[in-house]
Each structure stands twice: as structure tokens, then as C-alpha cells.
Amino acid sequence: MTVRNRVRRWVDERLPGATVDALTGDASTRIFYRVTPISGDSRILMDYGTPFCGDSEDQELSVIFKSAGLPVPEIVDAAPDPGCLLLEDLGDRMLEDELREANEQGEVPKTLLEAAELAGRIARDGSVALAKSARADGPMLDAERFRFEMEFFVENFVGNHRKITGDHAVLRGLLGDLAAESAQTPTSVMCHRDYHCRNIMVRTSGSLVLIDIQDARWGPDTYDLVSLVFDAYTDLADEWIERSIQRYLETVGLPDDAAVRHRIHTVGAQRMIKALGTFGYQVEVIKNTRYLDAIPRTLARLDRLLASNDETLPIHRAFRSIDLF
């Protein structure tokens, strides 16, 4: 993908002679490039595609994350017009790579437990920083948002991707109830919101760094945890999942009781259904096939989770009735 002319000129002014190479991006509208200067360290160019005023979401949230002691890339430079950031280059190794190698070796990966602890620090320390910031009254992962995501799933996964027709009134009702239940949390905490193995980079030193932080917001106290242990992009053994849950609960200071396990179950189900909606939209509307491999893994995991609890068993039956699994 060719970099925009205005962005290219901005790069040339700062790093004359640098090469700019496109990178595989995420499901957002942003485009990423690696900028390699004639001398010195390479950088990552994040192009929003359009100018922005003041600080971008990434800049605002970077300040909040850093004030909480949470690892994020350094923002080297910013250009509201034409609309891009120049970031520290963290390399190409993701937690996904670490987990794949651990699966091949049959080991419990140390980095997974560190990622679970980091998720706990986002909830514990990030919440304090977010509450003190100008974004304290910012967006939330609440029942309204979750209901939107459930409808998005019905439209884009059930309808567009699987081509299953009908009004699905019963299913919509059950998913609406799940949305309301998933939003119930004793305390809202700061959530990364997309906390998975492709958004956690691993430095050459082995330390973890968070990327894709621009959607961080208040949400349920188990949201980032379930995003990690029910990750659509990797396979985790049950033992690994349980140890990750324990590390997260210890870090946040949550008890391992029936109420917390209930929230892990319901929020986990909601999060996976939401992910399937995103995958359906990316594949069918955006024509992005990168997410095809994640669909069968997520369906298999969801099949197992929904059937394991009386509360979500009706959703499981509804999915079975339309041959979704």
C-alpha cells in the first residue's frame, strides 16, 4: 500500500531518504508503515487517513497508560495535519508468536502469565489514572454498547457470513439479556478493550508492551481477562487458562468466588460473540480474509462455554437450532 503523498512529504522533511514499507494492520481504518532512516532506529508510522485536531485518542491514552506505569510505545512525533504519528518500533514479535512456540513445546508460557498480570495492572492501576484524567467521564462498555455488538453479530455473522435468514427474534432476545448481564460489574475498571495476543508486543528483552490502546475505556472487571484467555488467535490449554485467571485475580485483588466466575463466564460469552460479529464484517464487507482462521476456533470455544452453564444454555440451544456451530 502506497503512503499518502502528504504523509510521505512529512516523513521526508524529518527523515530524508528514509524508506517507508507497509505493515499488516488491524481491523481499524488506520494504516501502519515501518520507516527506516538512512541511519538510526526505525520507526512505526501510524496513518489515520485524515487530519485530526489537538491530540489523537492514541496520544491522550498513551499519557494515561504511562502515568499508570503501563508499557506503551513512545510517541516520537505527531502531525495532526496530515494526520499521523511516528512511534517507537517495537519489532515484529507478538505474544501470539510466544504462545505458538509454547504450544509446540508443551510448556506453560511465562509470557502468558505476565500478560494476565499486565491485564490486572490495567484494571488496578489504569483505573486510578483514568479516573484522574480528562477522560474520567468517557465512554463505557455498558449494556447499550453490548446490545449493539450482539445486533452487529446477528447482522454480520449470522446473516452476512453464514447466510442464515430469518428475523431471529428469539436469539436476539437471548443475546439482549446476555448483553445486560455482561454489563453488570461491582466496579467498572479501565479496559484495554482489545486485549489479545496480537496487541501485546514482546521486546527483545522479553518485556511486554501494549499496542492498539486507542479504544481503552471503562468496562466490566473481567473484560480484559476474558479477552486474553478466550483469545481468538491462539489455542490455550485449560491449565494455562486457569493459571492466567488466578494471576489476574491476584493482581487485581478479586476473590475467586462464584460471583467472579459467573462474570468470567457471561462476559467471556459476550466477548466471543462480539468477536464473531467483527470477523463476519471484516470477511464479508471489508473483504479481509485475515480473520477466517479465527472463526472456527472461536465457535468451538463458544460451543463449549455456552453449554457449560445453565444460564447460557438457551443461547447454546438457539445457536444449535440455526446450525451455527
Image: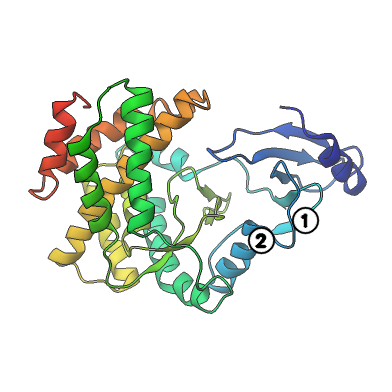
Q: Measuring 30% from the left and 40% from the top, which residue is drawn there?
A: 273
Percent position of residue 72, x then y: 59, 59
Residue 19 location, quadrant: top right
User: Is 73 placed above or below 32 here?
Assistant: below
Quarter of the image containing the N terminus?
Answer: top right
Percent position of residue 18, x then y: 85, 38
Quarter of the image containing the C terminus?
Answer: top left
Q: Measuring 39% from the left and 58% from the top, which residue is drawn there?
A: 141
Q: Amino acid at mark 1?
A: Ala
Q: Measuring 17% from the left and 59% from the top, which residue is drawn there?
A: 262
Q: Amino acid at mark 2?
A: Gln
Residue position marked by numbered label 2 in the rendering: 59
Residue position marked by numbered label 1 in the rendering: 78
Percent position of residue 156, x then y: 39, 31
> Residue pushed farthest top?
163
| Neighbour tally class for label 1: few under 14, some 14-19, many 20 plus, Cα within 10 Å | some
| Neighbour tally class for label 2: few under 14, some 14-19, many 20 plus, Cα within 10 Å | some
